[in-house]
Image: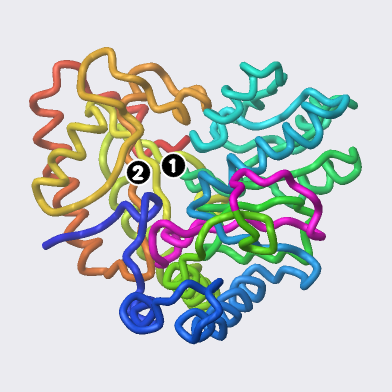
């Protein structure tokens, strides 16, 4: 059996999405900017897809949703655009983010630091969540932007975005959220939240790879990252990926329609898998179930390197992931595990299991059996593991 439990990395394209996309590869393949019929016949599908994006995020007509290649591009665009608009040519010099952001944020912040930007990396609590009230003490008159993810890609922990957005609004500071792991898994209503910029990516909610988006509230100015044409209302140059946009629109519409399924059926399967994992000795799962996206588990199994566990799972057809960089003794620790204050010997043991609406109960049952056997085998040959009763069924 082949079981895919790495859905926070990417997802299967929903067959319904692929069906909508297919004509724009082989039939209506014209460049939308061309004046001939091959180009113009793509326009109705593009309008429909953009409407699906606005509806799926409940964005206002006066807001902009700009199609990008991925959320990494969207994140880079916001950070570098704000640098150009409010730091390079202004009086501000400060950005606030968290220690557990995606590398697309962390690496870009590190780059901006080389240009003189001051960056504050907020710590998370023992649950892996930003304390919203802590943010207030770090905002100054020099703060240009706060960028905090909506849901963590490794733990699935949900951040207090509503509170954070309100704090930023009261302080007069721009707020951006990397919502890649939230869109399609939980309700996202941009008319209810004061978010200036929001990034998302189609392949995280059963759309195609290579297409994402950036929401810009009230169509406010943001210096372009890509130049060379007047595409997307002059916001982003580059020939439109018609099939990708069509797929992203359809995928978001289907994801929103399936939110109740995600929150009930997927959550039940996630909880069943988690319950079985917690029957093992010396394990813990990061964060309360109610504070996580309904599909994600980050578990540490004492005495077993994360990559060793991945090897056993992969041999048996199960795909999962870990934050460990390699299998050597001096491998890089999982940064999220370090941020929440996990002991050094646990920072290498994290295993992420992420489900989707296509995950079946049969697959979960199979995974439970393989996991149990893998833990027994790997602990039997471990030079570091010894049973500690106080660890049993623990949860961080």
Query: Of 236 and 166, which appears nearest the observer?
Result: 236
Instruction: Quickly name the residue at label 2.
Output: 352
Instruction: Quickly name the residue at label 1.
Output: 154
Q: Earlier in the sequence, mark 2 or mark 1?
A: 1
- Residue contact at pointers 2 and 1, CB within 8 angstroms: yes
- Picture coordinates of residue 29, whole percent (x, y): 39, 77
Asked where in the image residue 183 lies, by quadrant, the reply is bottom right
Q: Secondary structure at mark 1?
A: loop
Q: Quadrant of the N terminus?
A: bottom left
Q: Is residue 386 left or right of residue 225?
A: left
Q: Point out the stretch of residues depicted in magenta.
A: 201-228
Identify whether 114 is placed above or below 104. above
Residue at x 34% of width, y 76% of height: 18
Q: Is residue 254 one of those drawn in magenta?
A: no
Q: How far apart are the two marked residues, 2 and 1, measured between alpha carbons?
A: 6 Å
Asked where in the image residue 329 lies, by quadrant, the reply is top left
Q: Secondary structure at mark 2?
A: strand
Residue at x 82% of width, y 29% of height: 89
Query: Of 255 and 127, which appears nearest the observer?
Result: 255
- Picture coordinates of residue 297, whole percent (x, y): 40, 48
| Coloring basis for residues | rainbow
- Picture coordinates of residue 175, whole percent (x, y): 75, 44
Q: Is residue 216 one of those drawn in magenta?
A: yes
Query: Of 322 and 201, which appears nearest the observer?
Result: 201
């Amino acid at each position: 059996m082949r079981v895919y439990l790495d859905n926070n990395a990417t997802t299967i394209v929903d067959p319904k999405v692929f069906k909508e996309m297919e004509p724009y590869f082989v039939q209506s393949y014209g460049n939308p900017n061309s004046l001939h019929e091959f180009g113009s016949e793509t326009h109705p599908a593009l309008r429909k897809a953009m409407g699906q994006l606005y509806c799926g995020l409940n964005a206002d007509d006066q807001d902009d949703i700009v199609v990008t290649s991925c959320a990494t591009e969207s994140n880079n665009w916001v950070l570098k655009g704000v640098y150009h608009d409010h730091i390079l040519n202004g009086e501000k010099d400060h950005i606030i983010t968290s220690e557990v952001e995606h590398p697309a944020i962390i690496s870009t912040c590190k780059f901006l630091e080389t240009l003189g930007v001051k960056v504050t990396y907020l710590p998370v609590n023992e649950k892996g969540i930003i304390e919203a009230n802590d943010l207030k003490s770090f905002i100054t008159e020099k703060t240009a932007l706060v960028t905090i993810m909506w849901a963590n890609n490794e733990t699935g922990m949900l951040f207090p975005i509503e509170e954070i957005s309100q704090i930023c609004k009261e302080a007069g500071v721009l707020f951006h959220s990397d919502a890649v792991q939230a869109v399609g898994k939980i309700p996202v209503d941009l008319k209810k939240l004061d978010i200036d910029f929001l990034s998302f990516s189609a392949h995280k909610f059963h759309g195609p790879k290579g297409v994402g988006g950036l929401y810009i509230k009230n169509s406010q100015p943001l210096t372009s990252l890509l130049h060379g044409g007047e595409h997307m209302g002059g916001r982003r140059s580059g020939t439109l990926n018609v099939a990708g946009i069509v797929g992203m629109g359809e995928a978001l519409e289907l994801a929103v329609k399936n939110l109740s399924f995600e929150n009930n059926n997927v959550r039940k399967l996630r909880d069943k898998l988690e319950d079985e994992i917690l029957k093992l000795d010396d394990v813990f799962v990061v964060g309360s179930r109610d504070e996580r996206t309904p599909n994600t588990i980050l578990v540490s199994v004492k005495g077993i390197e994360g990559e060793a566990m991945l090897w056993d799972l992969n041999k048996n057809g199960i795909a999962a992931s870990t934050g460990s960089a390699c299998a050597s003794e001096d491998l890089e620790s999982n940064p999220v595990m370090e941020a929440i204050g996990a002991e050094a010997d646990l920072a290498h043991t994290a295993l992420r299991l992420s489900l989707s609406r296509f995950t079946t109960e049969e697959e979960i049952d199979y995974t439970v059996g393989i996991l149990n056997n893998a833990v027994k085998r790997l602990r039997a040959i471990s030079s570091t593991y010894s049973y500690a009763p106080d660890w049993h069924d623990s949860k961080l």
